Amino acid sequence: MSYEILIALIGFAFASSVTPGPNNLMVMASGANYGLRRTVPHVLGISLGHAFMVWMVGVVLLQVFVTYPALNLILKIVSAVYMLWLAWKIANAVPPEAKKVTGTPFTFFQAAAFQWVNPKAWFMAITAISAYAPQDRGAAIGSLIVAVVFAATNLPAVTIWAWIGVQVRRWLGTARRLRVFNVTMAVLLIGSLWPMLAA
């Protein structure tokens, strides 16, 4: 991989990772509700889970989607249903009269598994492999290089959103405010489905 392509990949990975999307909205909500320490497994699950997804897309799945385009529609439907369910969970994390947050933050494996139904994660993975994977290293090694760069860039970008959530927590001292925040995050999560559904 040339220096120019590496810089371009890092730029794409950071820009696509730090901009609002399902992962970042969920991590911000987790930081606000559970604090940074309890959100760390969620952050690590996103970064490492997405890196594994990028590698798998490069090695296997890109060809599968070309061969069976109907799988793309199935993935959209499953993703939409799952994200609606997650939005409902976020909106109901704090009952109206609650004094503290109920529920639990995402685990490492839940966050890693979520990447497979996250439309933005699919877009990022397919674009990264298509545009930046070195062709002279073979599919496995070329995809691994892209996956490692993505993980290293994605981790600090996602952590920023968890930190923002922790800072927002200071202004969410009442159950009512936290409830409004969670419902807002849920609505934004649903709104993040629009680019996928409109495509």
Image (cartoon, rainbow, N blue to C red):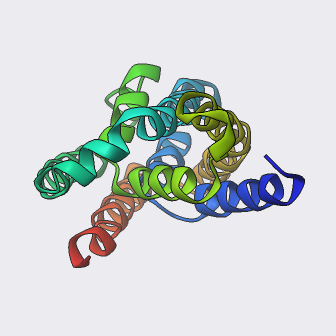
Residue at horizontal 31 percent and vertical 60 percent from the top: 183
Residue 66 horizontal side relative to residue 7, left or right = left
Farthest-out residue, right? 3
Corner quadrant of residue 12: bottom right
- Image location of residue 15, percent across then percent down: 67, 64
Residue 99 horizontal side relative to residue 47, left or right = left
- Image location of residue 110, percent across then percent down: 36, 26
Of 133 and 111, nearer the camera is: 133
Q: Quadrant of the C terminus?
A: bottom left
- Image location of residue 132, percent across then percent down: 64, 54
Residue at horizontal 18 percent and vertical 56 percent from the top: 80
Farthest-out residue, front? 136
Of 198 and 192, nearer the camera is: 198
Of 90 and 150, nearer the camera is: 150
Residue 194's place in the image compared with 66, above or below, is below
- Image location of residue 49, percent across then percent down: 48, 30
Farthest-out residue, bottom? 198
Total count of labels: 0
Residue 76's place in the image compared with 194, above or below, is above
Residue 9 shows up from this direction: yes
Residue at horizontal 70 percent and vertical 56 percent from the top: 14
Residue 87 shows up from this direction: no
Residue 109's place in the image compared with 163, above or below, is above
Residue at horizontal 69 percent and vertical 50 percent from the top: 157
Of 167 and 138, nearer the camera is: 138
Residue 130's place in the image compared with 139, above or below, is below
